[in-house]
Image (cartoon, helix red, strand yellow):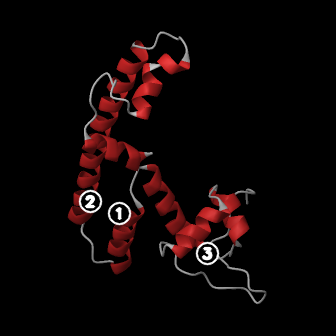
């Protein structure tokens, strides 16, 4: 059996699970505290032991995060999976909702890029006290264009 493969019945410590999945130990702890990963059984020595099902669940969470799902959205997907009473239509609905949110973020990011490009184009490379980018960030009113509250708050949430 290759070094990176594990037997179906093999139980892994948190460290080995982290090494096998490429997920940070602290992230695994966080997912446990957040309730996304159920508490694993423990060895006689008190070490947490993770089996195939918990490893699959961790991979599900990681892939969902890679696709930009929030922890609450992942929690909802896992509730559907755990209840085993979900339909593809429910999952599809969540996916479409997520796609719309991504579209809105892309739109907001384009607006932010345009504002930054405008500010950068006005920058002469001179002294800092005369830099339009710094002036805009300090909010002295010399912004190349006004940024709406919605865009600003959305940008802060994305940061």
Q: Is residue 35 left or right of residue 84?
A: right
Tags 1 and 2 touching, CB below 8 Å: yes
Residue 41: name its quadrant. bottom right
Residue 94: mark in rendering? 2
Please report the residue visible at 27 percent of the width from the left and 77 percent of the height from the top. 85
Please report the residue visible at 40 percent of the width from the left and 46 percent of the height from the top. 156
Asked whether the viewer can see residue 5, the reply is no
Along the viewing direction, whichever of 7 and 66 lies nearer the viewer:
66
**Mark 3 residue element:** loop
**Mark 2 residue element:** helix
Q: Earlier in the sequence, mark 3 or mark 1?
A: 3
x, y percent for residue 98: 29, 52
Residue 73: mark in rendering? 1
Q: Which residue does the numbered mark 3 point to in the structure image? A: 51
Asked whether the viewer can see residue 136, the reply is yes
Residue 9: name its quadrant. bottom right
- Image position of 117 with respect to 105: above or below: above
Residue 39: name its quadrant. bottom right
Q: Is residue 17 left or right of residue 77?
A: right
């Amino acid at each position: 059996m290759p070094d990176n493969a594990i037997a179906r019945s093999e139980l892994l410590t948190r460290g080995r699970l982290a090494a096998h999945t490429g997920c940070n130990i602290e992230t695994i702890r966080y997912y446990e505290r957040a309730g996304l990963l159920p508490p694993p059984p423990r060895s006689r020595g008190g070490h947490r032991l993770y089996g195939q099902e918990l490893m699959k669940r961790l991979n599900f969470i990681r892939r969902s995060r890679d696709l930009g799902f929030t922890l609450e959205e992942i929690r909802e997907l896992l509730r559907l999976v755990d209840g085993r009473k979900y339909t593809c239509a429910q999952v599809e609905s969540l996916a479409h909702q997520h796609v719309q949110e991504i579209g809105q973020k892309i739109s907001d990011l384009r607006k932010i890029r345009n504002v930054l490009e405008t500010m950068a184009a006005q920058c002469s490379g001179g002294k800092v006290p005369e830099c339009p980018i710094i002036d805009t960030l300090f909010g002295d009113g010399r912004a190349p264009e006004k940024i709406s509250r919605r865009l600003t708050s959305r940008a802060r949430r994305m940061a």
